[in-house]
Image (cartoon, coloured by chain):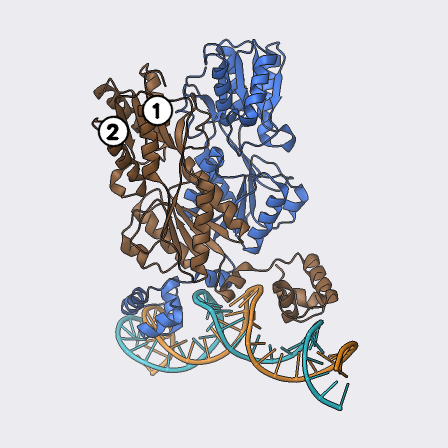
Chain colours: A blue, B brown, C orange, D cyan
Amino acid sequence: MATIRDVAKRAGVAVTTVSRVLNNRGYISEETRRKVYAAMDELGYRPNEIARALQKQRSFILGLIVPTVKHPFFGALVHEIERVAAARGYKLMLTHSLMEKEKEAEYLDLLRRHRVDGIVLGSHTLEVDVFRNVRLPLVTFDRRIGEAIPFICPDNYEGGRLATEHLIARGARKIVYLSGPLSFDMLSNRRHQAYVDVVRAHGRTPIVYEFTFQAFESPAEGRYGEEIARLFHEHPDVDGIFASSDILAYAAMHVARRLGRKVPEDVKIVGFDDLFLSQTVVPPLTTVRQPIPAMAERAVEVLERQIAGGAVEIEHVFPVDLIVRGTT
Amino acid sequence: MATIRDVAKRAGVAVTTVSRVLNNRGYISEETRRKVYAAMDELGYRPNEIARALQKQRSFILGLIVPTVKHPFFGALVHEIERVAAARGYKLMLTHSLMEKEKEAEYLDLLRRHRVDGIVLGSHTLEVDVFRNVRLPLVTFDRRIGEAIPFICPDNYEGGRLATEHLIARGARKIVYLSGPLSFDMLSNRRHQAYVDVVRAHGRTPIVYEFTFQAFESPAEGRYGEEIARLFHEHPDVDGIFASSDILAYAAMHVARRLGRKVPEDVKIVGFDDLFLSQTVVPPLTTVRQPIPAMAERAVEVLERQIAGGAVEIEHVFPVDLIVRGTT
DNA sequence: TAGCATGTGTCAATCGTTTAACATATGGGC
DNA sequence: GCCCATATGTTAAACGATTGACACATGCTA
């Protein structure tokens, strides 16, 4: 592949001149510029970004660690991050932690070796210390790691409140919360707290089913199904379900139907996330929407500010909306 | 950040020795190896992969151009490619074409500048020539580009045949095909051909609705909805739908329900892809499954073989399965 | 005519790593 | 005593680009 030297020779100018054209520095006549571009064209020259990164000590690559883009939420998140990052001249290196400690550590290391300019963490199972020692611009989604690492999240508590209040307003009397793994200490667990507070405030008892495994395989009947069927068996009079994610809500809809419960007549269901397909499932899902595009933008901004050496806010909480559809 | 020189100094050895340890070349005593590793540990040294890539003329990065990982099919595909690539020591640079010509060209260029070792194309709207001139290991999904670029696809014709025959076997008399954009000359359009052949063989007339826009925004009522509603209006007696993708099938299910048609009693629906959620939607979707994990593996293998300078098969067709569920 | 903006060139160092070539030293086997 | 495997070092070039320092034009202006 042609190098800057080849271009210089072909254009009959010095290497320095070509570099000046490429980087728009110093004085360059129109004539020379034209010659240089012509030479590049003829040779099919593409500046070697690897050499550039080495010299400039900036890779313009952002690292991404997410559980997997197969999960629709992270698919949407990565979509938006790619959009914003590209617009600002950054490339993305994508890795999948599958929520496994070893993979997460391994990829964190990998991204450091690659000298990415910053890392977006959509997954975190490691200890706080590991991240403190990374010494690289970081930003997380929905995970608070220590006090110095900025995080971005929806207003989880408000979302939980909206969902639960809505179920009550629609006449649900016995409301169950389907939770993700509470042990991971994710900010999304505040949805749980909101649910508990609201049902208690209405003089009822919280009922929580925790799903400890991760939904990276198909979420339908499989492991989720049994657990949800158990719920209907143990609480035959359940008439409201608040699921901590749309995926769990879909599974609940599925099981409800299998057991002959009509949604929303017999059971009302509210999800969380407003995924790609939530308006397409039948009936369309009432859910709490997170403003993913805005959150992605903020994530990249926060990284850029750190890259530039500036100080950043730690907390970035985004407002949520209740989207009322057919399941309530 | 510590360099190999720092490590050498700290370990009291020569830079060459450190490099020998890192790359496992030449003779190294256990004692020296230990000292070097200790020094690396103390300094938190990570070899600079950028420098390595420059020197070795191998980046060990694979470029990915897909419409977007927000689309569940590409989410699943990228998931599997990441898995295989990581296992073989490759990293992924992810880009989203959104099926736009300019973006595709821009990203193709970007990946070349980054000296990726190979590119997986999940999207292709450009002219054949552009790709022929890339001079880089390439492999595409479902797109035949010229005669020299290897492609990977499911057995589209067989899938279309299975789906259509199944609908007929289940008693559907008037079967409509919901097609993606036929103009793009994708291999998936063979599903269309199979559909046409089968219904003709049964003495019926093919009815095709083409959806020219891309489903990267939400696929529900929006643009799809109207078109599908029109279909039910123009052909009130339709009792079978073969959708060229699960997303289209979901939309069809959605509209059918809105218009009071029961699935599968009044209309039977078959999709294509077997996405993450297809067993979760209500009722679960009958669909044609592509073996995405195997296809992803093959994609990386095909790239590796090209990287190694070997010759590769051009056609890689994978068998499909009809997964019968609740919509038929 | 001095000064300055403009335009281009030469030279050399630098980013962090790999690697070839060669030197040197030790210890064992024959 | 020679050969050879083992073990480590020194030196220098290379990968492809950027950049600072400096030289040397040309042409305009004050």
The spot of residue A5 in percent (x, y) is 39, 72
Residue sitting at 46 percent across and 25 percent down? B280
First along the sequence among labels 2 and 1: 2
Which image quadrant for residue B183? top left
Q: Which residue is mark 2?
A: B199
Residue sitting at 26 percent across and 37 percent down? B193
Which SS class for mark 1?
strand
Front residue of A144 and D9:
D9
Q: Is residue B52 above or below residue A235?
A: below
Q: From mark 2 to mark 1, how far is it between C-alphas? A: 15 Å
Residue sitting at 33 percent across and 14 percent down? B260
Chain containing the residue with disc 1: B
Q: Is residue A50 above or below residue B226?
A: below
The spot of residue A102 in percent (x, y) is 63, 44
Quarter of the picture containing the N terminus of chain B is: bottom right
The spot of residue B29 in percent (x, y) is 72, 68
Q: Which residue is mark 1?
A: B269
Please indicate, yes or no, whether residue A91 appears anywhere in the rendered image.
Answer: no
Which SS class for mark 2?
helix
Front residue of C26 and A272:
C26
Front residue of C19 and B95:
C19
